[in-house]
Image (tube, rainbow, N blue to C red):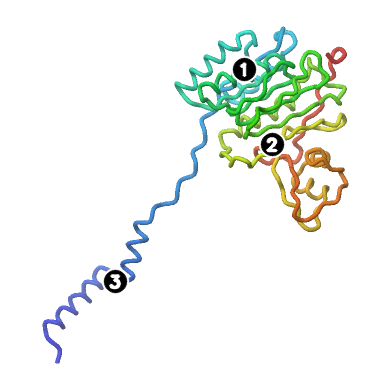
Amino acid sequence: MLDPRRVVALAVVALLALGTGVAVASPAKSKRAAVAATAPPPAPPAEPLPPPKIYLFRGAMGPFFSTGMDRLEEKLTKAGFSADVNEFTICRWIGDRAIASYKETPAPIVLIGHSMGGLCSVIISEMAAKENIPISLVITIDPAHATDDVPLNVERFINIFLSDSVLGGGNVVALPGYRGHYASYDLKENSRVSHINIEKSDDIHRQIIEMVTQLPRIQPQAQGDTVPLRYLVPGDTLVELWDSGVRVPVRRGDTMESIAAANRVPVWTLAQSNSLAENAPLTPGQTIIVPRHLTPPEPAAAMATPPSPPAGRR
């Protein structure tokens, strides 16, 4: 015969469970629930960086020969960015201002310069390196021959130049140990491009604005993940400003043409990056260096040939 007190206790438990709608959980289930409740939430996505501060620099006699920098500044400002165009002659003063501004309110720094303005962009990068300040992006457009190597604090560097130019022609390289993104474009084979019109291309401007727009959304990549690019651009081709290169494994059946098509790049870029013929056979397991953008481009994105210079190339 059951103990009456035990019967009453069981009845009370049953009534409480029915009245509150709460099931009586087993000790094992309760323990699992407690563990689940105390598990840490997933890490939130990284916050985008603040908008960059952009400093542009004209070359010598800039108001006459570097007017493309003024047009680029107008386009960047219209797109909502903080952008100022300056003479290269006040380079170090602007550099001090940029460093002081960063220390007060850290924001990505972008430096863009034509001719002597390109040299200035690298000088300011060197000044920032001494203060342990990173430079998010440097773009030099036919910089002077005397331009120094890219310092290690520059995260992304692009040089668009004419190696046979007398007024520019700076074939800028990076310091040993550089781990950032690097791309170099020699346009000497394009007879329509000269030192005094190379910075005026609307399509170069468009691509620069796209890169600046994408910068705050790009997450840092692991060291060793990038491969520098150096191109002698064919004279009859349209050009895109790639960010750097990446190594892609070759699979069975891959060809130079199929890899180029899959990554939406011209075959000549693969040939130059890998020192191969455009029809070279590939072996599964080897790697191919492929140029890449910060983000995938639109299908029709390409740089149109700049307008013809008013005089012969200089």
* Mark closer to the chain start, 1 or 2: 1
Q: Residue at x 17, y 76 (%)?
A: 12
Q: Residue at x 74, y 8 (%)?
A: 64
Outermost residue toward the bottom in this view:
1
Q: Position of residue 89 (x, y in %)?
A: 64, 8
Give whichever of 282, 50 is nearer the camera.
282
Residue 284 quadrant: bottom right
In the image, what residue type sits under mark 3? Pro
Number of the label disc, if any, that sits on residue 27? 3
| Camera-nearest label, 1 or 2 | 1
Q: According to the image, label 2 marks what residue? A: 244
State which quarter of the image contains the N terminus. Answer: bottom left
Question: Label 1 neighbourhood size at 10 Å, few (<14), some (14-19), many (20+)?
Answer: many
Q: Secondary structure at mark 1?
A: helix
Q: Quick one: label 3 or label 2, which is nearer the N terminus? A: 3
**Which quadrant holds the C terminus?**
top right
Identify the residue shown where x is 75% and y is 55%.
Answer: 285
Up/down of 283 relative to 307, above or below: below
| Label 2: few (<14), some (14–19) or many (≥20) C-alpha neighbours in 10 Å | many
Q: Residue type at mark 2?
A: Ser
Percent x, y of residue 67: 72, 13
Relative to 111, 132 lies left or right: left
Please rate how many residues cluster around mark 3, counting C-alpha atoms within 10 Å: few if below 14, some from 14 to 19, many from 20: few
**Camera-side residue of 279 and 73:** 279
Residue 168 place in picture, x, y as percent: 76, 16
Q: Which mark is residue 266?
A: none
Residue visible at 63% across and 41% down?
A: 224
Q: Quadrant of residue 226?
A: top right
Q: Give the residue type that dot 1 points to.
A: Ile
**Front one among 172 and 200:** 172
Disc 1/disc 2 C-alpha distance (Å)? 22 Å
The dot on residue 123 is 1
